[in-house]
Image (spheres, rainbow, N blue to C red):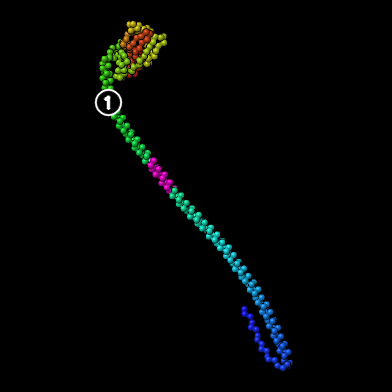
Amino acid sequence: MSSPQQPTYIIPSPSAPNWKMPLVAGVLVLLAASNIFLFIQLDHLRTENKNDMSKLTQQLNGAIEKIRIDSSEEVQRSTKRVEALQSALAQSRRAAQAAVGQAKVDAQKRVEDLQQKVATEQQAQQQAIAAVKQTADTATTQLASVSTDVGTVKSDVATQKTQLEQTIANLKRATGELDSHASLIATNANELKALRELGERNYSEFTITKSKKPTRVGDVTVELRKVDAKKNRFTILITADDKTVEKKDRTLNEPIQFYTLKAKQPDEIVVNQVKKDTIIGYLATPKVQNGRAGS
């Protein structure tokens, strides 16, 4: 603010002393006092204005500072919220990437598992095919071997059949003492085997030693009573159906016949070997067991 303009006074040239001079001097003094008062008031006003302006400036600066502080705090809070959101977004992105990565890993693992299963299945299939092929080759080899064996067996059977027929043809025939039927007599193990092959009778082999206790042979009992090894002769007791008969002074390969209640044809005992206190032979019984009428 500009200072007020000082008033200008023109002093008149001196004149002869009169009553006006004191009045003029008083006016001048009064004007000087007025100017001084006005200057003091103006200075006081300046000081008050300066103080008011200082206070106003301080208040304005305080308000501005407060606004700045508040704005700074809000900015900080906003910054923190932004940073929090950015962190959450980054975490979400990482989680999404991790999930995608894990999904890729899981998918890759499933693919690898399936590939492994396919490879295992193919290997098992190849092994099965190889096993089947090997089995087929083995079966072919075995079939060829079996064919050879069958041929050999057929040849052996033919040979055995020829030998059996020859053995049967050479069997001794003897007429029994109880019927007029001529029976085939086996004199050794091979001939007895031939008789079994014919299947006309049942055969039970025995070895009987001289004893007071009879030996069971089939459904009968036989007791050796006397032996003459030098002459191949012997005496036996045969018990069948609670009946005992003595067959005295018999010889080798002689059919010793006796009847039982089980069959119409007689049973036969044939002794092939006579040793000291021992006889060896077989019992032949009919296949058909339909019983006889009477004893």
Q: To which residue does mark 1 refer?
A: 151
Q: Which region is colored magenta?
A: 106-120
Give the answer, above or below, for where 63 lies relative to 274.
Answer: below
Instruction: Report the front residue among 131 and 51.
Output: 51
Image quadrant where residue 267 sits: top left
- Amino acid type, residue under disc 1 in the picture: Gly
Residue 269 percent location from the top left of the image:
34, 12
Q: Is residue 82 left or right of residue 50?
A: left
Residue appearing at x 31%, y 11% in the figure: 253
Give the answer, above or below, for where 159 lies relative to 272.
Answer: below
Residue 235 visible in image: no
Residue 79 percent location from the top left of the image:
54, 61
Instruction: Report the front residue among 13 and 171.
Output: 13
Crowd class of label 1 (few under 14; some 14 to 19; many from 20; radius 10 Å): few
Residue appearing at x 58%, y 66% in the figure: 68
Instruction: Report the front residue among 14 and 234.
Output: 14
Residue 123 percent location from the top left of the image:
37, 39
Q: Main secondary structure of the magenta part?
A: helix
Give the answer, above or below, for where 34 lies relative to 114.
Answer: below
In the structure shown, which secondary structural element does the residue marked by tag 1 occupy?
Answer: helix
